Image (cartoon, grey):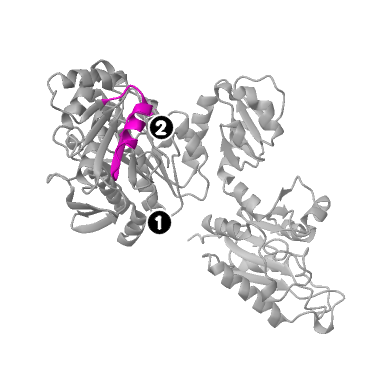
Amino acid sequence: MEIKMNKAIFLDRDGTINVEKDYIYKCEDLVFEEGSVEALKTFKNLGYILIVVSNQSGIARGYFTEEDLKAFNNNMNEKLKEEAIEITEFYCCPHHPDGLAEYKKVCDCRKPNNKMLEDAIEKYNIDREKSYMIGDKASDIGAGLKSKLKTVLVKTGYGLKDMEKIDKNETLVCENLKDFSEVLKREKLNELIFEEFSKKVQIKNVVMDSRKITEGSLFFAINNGNSYVKDVLDKGASLVIADNTDIADERIVKVADTIATMQDLATKYRNKLDIQVIGITGSNGKTSTKDIVYSLLSKKAKTLKTEGNYNNHIGLPYTLLNVTDEEKFVVLEMGMSSLGEIRRLGEISNPNYAIITNIGDSHIEFLKTRDNVFKAKTELLEFVNKENTFVCGDDVYLAKLDVNKIGFNEDNNFRIESYEFSDKGSKFTLDGKEYEMSLLGKHNISNTAIAIELAKKIGLSEEEIKEGLKDIKISNMRFQEIRVGEDIYINDAYNASPTSMKAAIDTLNEIYNDKYKIAILGDMLELGEDEVKYHVEVLNYLLDKKIKLIYLYGERMKKAYDIFMKNKSEEYRFWYYPTKEGIVESLKNIRMEKVILLKASRGTALEDIIVKE
């Protein structure tokens, strides 16, 4: 039976972990180098054993005792344990050739000799090829090389002084421990870059925006990004991948198509990583569901999610390339506007789990029918088995699927049995268990229930799930509550479709019962030739809702308003405004506490209406 070997990071102590101070031994003098604690946490998360190997000639010189040394090391470990970090063992050499009494000796443990390293390697069954020696002195590097470890010199402590004493071709030089941790987190990415382009680099981050370049960046020059190649090189980029530049620099990899290259690298990188990928799509609620899943999984392990609107053929591979070796879960939002796009995102990301929130009218301008929307969204299921697929079973299209169905209807596999709203958020019962969260709305309860069942499948405990529900932070402009004086604005203006607009109206109708409720609704885009019909449908939906005033804005809403009001002349609640300023002035004249819903597609920028005090 093969015995598993461990990987380790061997660390010098003074000048590497803690700030160098001549012959430091008093516990009160312990000051950690900037970023070193965070770096140690990263090393631990990456599965490394942490071992200190330190020359402590202050004992031989009579400045302090072995008991003082032990107390200092114990104090350091206690402080690190507060951050869930622990040094496995401290190896310290107390000798010096000019020392006192029994400590005066030429020994084989004092660095650059390597007995301390060899003792630890044998005791902990260390894999030399996967382990590092990090220190601020040439003697640290010498010991590491003798033990055939990878070596890193940090510029803290004596590092700047000793840089000239080492061979930079065999030893990596970093600013500090934190700087090296950023490199180590991307070890697999650096390996991939070498495999693909024969470039030995130390990538610390991946960017597409030239304004975000830092030393060690990998820059993808997409579209006009080719114009900024010289600028990013001047800022310290380690590697540039470009398809339209004449600049000659060994840090540039010229390719036929930058986007295709990024997609190819992301696919290969994903398959190198030990991660579980969750793909989330649907006509509405993708972003909120992504945020909820992220909050839950973060209680189990380090998790990365799609940021902003990076949910397409560029944003998804970009997100994957920003995964580090530290993450265990990656939550990817997948958008589309035509058939085949979700399939391509699935090919790149190879998801382990899938969520589909609903099938609605978003992008129907391009896909023409809901049947086609259903076909496009369910392309995701080509990559995930049915046991790992979770959908809203209340959706008439998704209810047909033989997968995990969650919702309010009785025939779902997992049923939401009851719910209630309060000023603190929502309570609901899912399969006999009660949950609480700060989000409001039946649609958010449905999405959260889907996230909970997925989390259970992955292996989260009830305690982890409930802790995750406490910390949900939804992306801006997704039913975002903004208080201005005594008024509450509900900014749900990131995007809109008939389905999501009705859900927002329902939520406004059900909550804030003691407030004067106003709905400000703008155009819904990408609805195709029947767009006006869909807008009229929403206006009719409002008729039996307990909403005092409905303000409408936008060209499509104007057409719908004119049709709607032909037979509704007694409906005094509906008002069309050609300008946002007109709506703002009208709101100012309503001198009572009110709740104001803002809902429209992104192109309408309806959030401009929010009145600041």
Asked whether the residues under the numbered discs 2 and 1 touch, taking CB atoms below 8 Å apart as contact, a structural biologist would say no
Q: Position of residue 480 (x, y in %)?
A: 36, 43
- Which mark sits nearer the N-terminus, 2 or 1? 1
**74 over 414 or under it: above or below:** below
Which one is nearer the viewer's eye here, 563 or 473? 563
Which one is nearer the viewer's eye here, 169 or 399? 399
Q: Position of residue 50 (x, y in %)?
A: 60, 63
In space, the residues marked 2 and 1 are separated at their CA atoms by 39 Å
Residue extent of the magenta highlight: 576-602
Mark 2 nearby-residue class (10 Å; few <14, some 14–19, many ≥20) = few
For image coordinates 28% across by 20% down, the residue present is 556
Q: Secondary structure at mark 1?
A: loop
**Dot 1 amino acid type:** Lys
**442 over 252 or under it: above or below:** below
**Rendering quarter of residue 340:** top left
**Residue designated by label 1:** 300
**Rendering quarter of residue 285:** top left
**Dot 2 amino acid type:** Asp
For image coordinates 47% across by 40% down, the residue present is 271
**Rendering quarter of residue 189:** top right
For image coordinates 15% across by 32% down, the residue present is 543
For image coordinates 73% across by 57% down, the residue present is 156
Q: Position of residue 107 (x, y in %)?
A: 80, 72
> Furthest-right residue in view?
98
**Residue designated by label 2:** 608
Q: Secondary structure at mark 2?
A: helix
> Furthest-top residue in view?
529
What label sits on residue 454 in the rendered view?
Answer: none
Nearest to viewer (mark 2 / mark 1): 2
Name the side, left or right, on which 562 lies relative to 208. Answer: left
